[in-house]
Amino acid sequence: MTASSPEYFEYRIKAGDSLSMIMAKFYGVGPRSPNYNTYLSQILSLNPHIKNPTRSVRDPCYY
């Protein structure tokens, strides 16, 4: 990333999306991956509106 680019990107949630599906698509990690919890913690810290990461998400999320 360059100095002018953000440290995150915005993803528009589609019907039926889950954090696990999005993480697999963009980061190539699944729930059994050793670094899954690291990515999950990062995503949740950028998205405090997500209260339950196991449910489908509806609002835009930052990754």
Image (cartoon, helix red, strand yellow):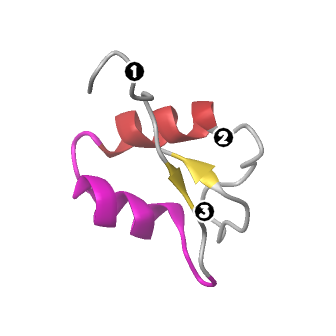
Q: Which residue is mark 1?
A: 4
Q: Name the amino acid type tagged 1.
A: Ser
Image point (59%, 65%), residue name: 12
| Sequence-first disc among 2 and 3 | 2
Percent across and percent down for residue 60 are: 66, 57
Q: Which residues are magenta?
A: 15-35
Q: Quadrant of the N terminus?
A: top left
Between marks 3 and 1, how big is the CA–CA gap? 33 Å
- Give the percent coordinates (x, y) of residue 37: 39, 40
> Residue 35 bears which disc, if any?
none
Q: Nearer the viewer, residue 29 or 1?
A: 1
Q: Amino acid at mark 2?
A: Asn
Between label 1 and label 2, give the one nearer the viewer.
1
Disc 2 from disc 3: Cα separation = 14 Å
- Cα distance, mark 1 to mark 2? 22 Å
Q: Which residue is mark 2?
A: 47
Q: Is 59 in front, or is 36?
A: 59
Residue at x 22% of width, y 58% of height: 28
Relative vertical location of residue 14 with respect to residue 62 in this rendering, above or below: below
Q: Which is more N-terminal, label 2 or label 1? A: 1
Asked if one can make out residue 47 in the rendered structure from this viewpoint, the answer is yes
Image side of residue 60 versus residue 30, left or right = right
Name the mark nearer the viewer: 2 or 3.
2
Quadrant of the rendered structure where residue 59 is? Answer: bottom right
Circle 2 crowding by C-alpha within 10 Å: few under 14, some 14–19, many from 20:
some
Who comes first in sequence, dot 3 or dot 1? 1
Q: Is residue 31 visible?
A: no
Q: Quadrant of residue 13?
A: bottom right
- The image shows residue 59, relative to residue 37, as above or below, that is below
Q: Which mark is residue 54?
A: 3
